Amino acid sequence: MEINKDNFEAIVERLFNKLEEADKKMDRLLNHDACLKGDELLDNQDLIGMLKVSHRTLQRYRSQGKLIYCNLNGKSFYRLTDVNKFIDDQFAGIK
């Protein structure tokens, strides 16, 4: 295969695209590890079933800052310890 200017530029372009993809994957993994911190993660469906609330109520808890969450690939996740703290805080107001 003869390498001319056009071929070289195409190869370099593909190489940069692959490096960019790898960089995005590493960012996702680093974000995932920072979010997880050795704890179990729950998604929206888990919490909706656990708390017996609607999706909108869950969204409101997030918006109001009552429930800590982490976004991974556009999906919301919650650490079990944060959920337990949220539940404790909600019941503390009732006592």
Image: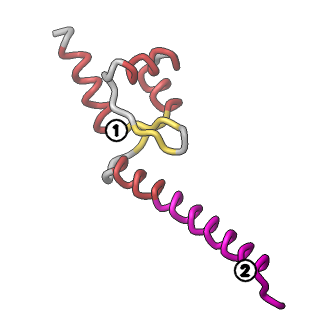
The disc label shown at residue 8, or none:
2
Q: Where is residue 56 shown, x and y percent of the image? A: 50, 16
Question: Label 2 crowding class (10 Å Cα cut-off): few <14, some 14-19, many 20+?
Answer: few
- Disc 2 to disc 1, C-alpha distance: 51 Å
Q: Residue at x 34, y 18 (%)?
A: 64
Instruction: For mark 2, give the secondary structure.
Output: helix
Q: Where is residue 25 shown, x and y percent of the image? A: 53, 59
Residue 25 shown in magenta: yes
Q: Residue at x 47, y 62 (%)?
A: 26
Q: Where is residue 46 shown, x and y percent of the image? A: 49, 32
Q: Nearer the viewer, mark 2 or mark 1?
A: 2
The extreme left residue here reads 95
Q: Where is residue 43 shown, x and y percent of the image? A: 48, 36
What residue sits right under mark 1 in the picture? 80
Q: Is residue 7 left or right of residue 75?
A: right
Q: Relative to the observer, which residue lies in front, 55 or 46?
A: 55
Instruction: For mark 1, give the secondary structure.
Output: helix
The extreme right residue here reads 1
Is residue 71 shown above or below 53? below
Q: Which residues are magenta?
A: 1-26
Q: Is residue 79 left or right of residue 5?
A: left
Q: Is residue 17 left or right of residue 80?
A: right
Q: Residue at x 57, y 62 (%)?
A: 20
